[in-house]
Amino acid sequence: MKKLLSIILSLVMLVSVGALSVPVFAAVGSIETTEPVTKNKIIPQVNGENTSDVTFEWISENPKQIKFTYTGDGTLENWDFGDLVEGKDYRVIDQGDNTITIELLDTSFNGDIIANAIVEDEEEEEETTKKATTTKQNTSSTSPKTGAAAAAGIAAMGAGAAILTALRKKED
């Protein structure tokens, strides 16, 4: 009976350690092998406030060309690109009703680009009631650190070894 109990206990501990150790090694298989593309961080704004009403699209990498589109309800008056100076840091390639395409003249520029759409709102009250909350999606390719799972697995394995040793000493 004692041998059967020790075998069952050993199998339960083995399964427990195996199940807890799998998440520890999950990050090993998910390592990316491609080089990340370095692009400027673009901060879309409407009247100086961060928003999702301005979208952007990279047209080319070198020279860096970016197309911005305003998709909101107000009337687009103009575009402002923060600290960038037109003619020195960027030039306008194309401009439509709610779109603008710019080309960065200094291709080594790696700072943030603020794309601020200057918009005339028809009703300011609507803007305050429609403030959108955005959630940041986790796009990381690595799993979270799971040291607690590994520690629990090692502790269970140690407890099992201690019980088996005690049972064997008792039999002798």
Image: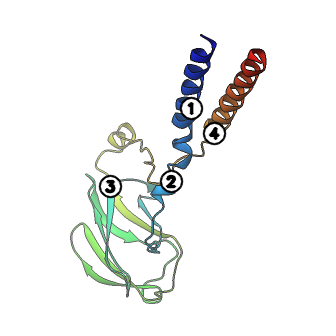
Side of 141 relative to 167 (left or right): left
How much space separates mark 1 and mark 2, taking CA atoms?
A: 26 Å
Q: Where 79 sits versus 27, above or below?
A: below
* Amino acid type, label 1: Leu
How much space separates mark 4 and mark 1, taking CA atoms?
A: 13 Å
Residue at screen point 51% across, 34% down? 19
Q: Earlier in the sequence, mark 1 or mark 3?
A: 1
* Amino acid type, label 4: Ala
Which callout, 3 or 4, points to the residue nearer the camera? 4
Residue at which label 1 appears = 14
Q: Earlier in the sequence, mark 4 or mark 1?
A: 1
Q: Earlier in the sequence, mark 4 or mark 2?
A: 2
Side of 91 relative to 20 (left or right): left
Bin the neighbour count of mark 3 within 10 Å (Cα to Cα): few under 14, some 14-19, many 20 and up. some
Residue at screen point 37% across, 64% down? 117
Please report contact status of discs 3 and 4: CB closer than 8 Å, yes or no: no
Residue at which label 3 appears = 53
Residue at which label 4 appears = 150
Indicate the secondary structure of the residue bearing disc 2.
Answer: loop
